[in-house]
Image: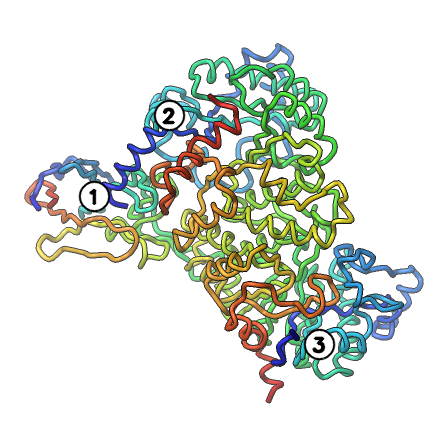
Amino acid sequence: MSKHVVATVAEIPPGQRKLVTVRGRSIAVFNLGGEFFGLFNRCPHQGGPMCEGILTGLIESDEPGHYQYSRKGEILRCPWHGWEFDVRTGQSYCEPERIQVRSYPVEVAAGQRVVEGPYVAETVPVTVEEQYVVVDV
Amino acid sequence: MSSALLERGSAQQTRLGLIDCDVHHALRSPKDLYPYLSARWREHLATYGSRRPTPFTGASPFFKSVPALSRKDAWPPNGGSPGSDLAFMQAQLLDRYGIQAGMLHLLSITGMDQRNQEFAPALCRAINQWQYAEWTQKDQRLKAAIVVPGEDAAAAVAEIEHWAGNSDFAQVSLVTHSIEPLGRRRYWPIYEAAMAHNLPIGLHSSGNNGHAVSATGWPSYYTEEHHEVSMSQQSVVTSMVCEGVLARLPKLKVVIVEAGLAWVPSLCWRLDRQWARMKDEVPHLTRPPSSYIREQVWFTTQPTDEPERPQDILTILEWIGWDRILFATDYPHWDFDDPETAFKAQMTELQRRMVFRDNARSVYGLA
Amino acid sequence: MSFPAVGAIDCDVHPAVPGMRALLPYLEEHWREQVAVRGIDGLDPASYPISIPANGRPDWRPASGKPGSDLELLREHVLAPFHTRYAILNCLYGAQSAFNVHFAGALCRAINDWIAAEWLDKEPRLRASIVVPVQDAELAAAEIDRCAADKRFVQVLLPAAGESPLGKRQHWPIYVAAERHGLPICVHAGSTFRHATTANGWPSYYLEDYVAGSHAFQAQLLSLISEGVFSKFPNLTVVLAEAGFTWLPQFMWRAVKTWRAMRAEIPWVDRAPAEIIRDHVRFTLQPSDAPPEAHQMEQTIEQIGSDRFLLFSTDYPHWHFEGDAALPDGLSASLVRKLLVDNPLETYPRLKETLQ
């Protein structure tokens, strides 16, 4: 694993993202309200370019016809089959325990997440060091 | 799926020269048809326009999942709706996957369910001329379907006769939500003409006929409607068998497009069991319904069925018959199947060749 | 080889109403008069014309009268040969297709009272579904409340193809009442003909209508799930009767596939449709639409991934099998044990109550 500067902080304003290739791997780095998160740019479903998908909020419901809306801009919809992924954790909103895209946590150090299941990608940590966004691949 | 597996799949598919049995080209706007319409019908299209039994001029009452029902990355960078830009389609689909032939199905305007009975044939002629000039002549990998005004059998036959023998057209297309089930007598002349010219009937889920989208009435959600088009296609198959179309026209080929296919075995079992106790109603069927399906009906793979145990897809394909199966991407729709990753179980080399190329060659008479 | 003598519970038997005359004693006076003055009769459902051979097995047809109309013959044809502990009566007389909801309600009341008096009172092994006017959910709920007091009514009967899909909110009063009384909902094959029997219009043949019936059930499952009926009514069980079941695996796969894409449209559906079906939905055995080879049935059952979903039924007097060969090939011995007794007992809590 080695660290790679992929952008300056200013290049990825809040709500935006940048697609980068590091060591042959396509990763997208998202800025959610000043915090940076990385996702592997391949949907665990059929390998679609996840990070070209739109960002939405999270719609939940405790009862038919009632809607709870939260987390605006933090849910990534794969542009192919529309699977929803939590940008912060890579967690899918359908059977979250089973389907997950590898996510890249903000903390360095002990930030390794291992996810079991049929769709597994590698984790890469993302950190901000001064004005740079750094991934650890 | 590991990147190594992905790369291997990609190389295999490119070498194969696969055939995609469901590609959606699109109009940039109805104006694209103007060069092919008379003044009378240009004027009509611009004013009264496309009128079908559906409540909105510009949308479905079942709000769709995404704009143009398409992959977000399929919007051409130079503008226009997904599927309307040939160059972009060539790059993103045909070249990318090494596709040697793509079977076109037009959905952005339909001729058969136009309520104006004079407009329908004029529109279909214009559509077919546009397909020929703007698509199949510009990229010979693409094959069009002859769009026919199927609710008027005589006019539909005339349209078939006009294009028959033109190798740019590989099949005849009708909407599946027709006024009567497609096996009914009023449509028979169309099938006779298609068979006479060795053209399969390509049936892609489409159309509005004023009937509820299910026998139980109108559901609320696209979630339901999207799944129910598959059931509607099952009724199409049932109709083509039980009304006797396949029995009467033993050389007629029917391709069922965009319905998935894991339902085929259980539909065949149900048809056969029920026919066994009701065969006196349908004496024109001299053998079990599934035997007609096994000989004369083919099914495209998309949207690919995703069993909980991935290996079960191989069991299902085996039950259907490996020779019945036609790979399709459904590009540029959102539920597109990537040929490299859509199947989560490993086929044999022979099975792969059949599904991804050779069955289609045989059905469509491609070199 | 005779049918296993384990006290099977037959979850779909059809008593035939001889004619409106039989229901007159159970109608209120003004309805009795209306029936006579207006000549109202002939409400046998077009989904099951008696004259069609498939709707009455030859050895189950009486010398005179409709198949399924005679209790003594029911004992001889079904209760004895299958060593039946309980049989659940689903009366398919046409009340649920009538347009006048008040009359439909009155007819349903009469049918249920007729069932109690002419069948349940006379044969302790019989149980029944409450026939309700699905056309008006409030009236249907009232009928459920009225009949639920009689513990021999174990379920609520709805037709597979009505005016609007069963998950829709206008039907919810039915589920409120059913859940309150611990009664499963039975969706039974048959159409009220409010809509064509397919999305492509009206087929020519009865055979096609019958085959299309499985799609009606699938659409109903989609509706019940998508509208959130199982979220709103977590204790509700739905029994699909005379639906076939070999279509179930591919249906579940497709439903889950769609849900994964469309979850945000129906966010109250918080788990995979396949899970919901395994927990809440049951299927009667006949017709089995069995595949030609036993191993295909075995594989299909494995793909369904449950041994709790099947409920024994003969579908008497409809003709699906000869003699007592009601069990298709390919069912494991343990599944057979479960479907004959355990699954019905689990599905119909009232059967267990009565045992004590």
Q: Residues within 10 Å of mark 2 (few under 14, many from 20)?
A: many
Q: Chain of mark 3?
A: C
Q: Residue furthest bottom?
A: C356
Residues tagged by mark 3 and mark 1 found on one chain of the structure: no
Three-letter amino acid code of the residue under disc 1:
Asn
Q: Residues within 10 Å of mark 1 (few under 14, many from 20)?
A: many
Identify the secondary structure beneath mark 1.
strand
| Residue count near mark 3 (Cα–Cα under 10 Å), binned few <14, some 14–19, many ≥20 | some
- Foreground mark, 3 or 1, reads 3
Q: Residue C84 placed where, x, y %?
A: 67, 78
Q: Horizontally, is C7 left or right of C207 in the view? A: left
Instruction: Name which quarter of the figure residue A40 lies in.
Output: top left
Viewed as shown, does residue C265 lie left or right of A50?
Answer: right
Residue furthest out toward the right: C37
Quarter location, residue B68: top left
Q: Which mark is residue C45?
A: none
Identify the chain of the residue marked 2, using the numbered disc in the image: B
**Which is nearer the eye, C56 or A94?**
C56
Q: Nearer the viewer, mark 2 or mark 1?
A: 2
Are the numbered discs 2 and 1 placed on the same chain, yes or no? no
Spatial separation of the CA atoms under disc 3 and disc 1: 72 Å
Residue denoted by label 2: B94
The relative height of residue B186 versus residue B261 in the rendered view (above or below) is above
Residue C81, numbered label: 3
Which residue is pictured at 47% across the width and 39% down the height?
A: B301
Residue closest to the eye, B12 or C120: B12
Mark 3 residue type: Pro
| Residue in the picture at 38% in, 24% down | B89
Which label sits on residue A31? 1
Residue B72 percent location from the top left of the image: 36, 34
Disc 3 + disc 1, Cβ < 8 Å: no
Q: Position of residue B316 (x, y in %)?
A: 48, 49
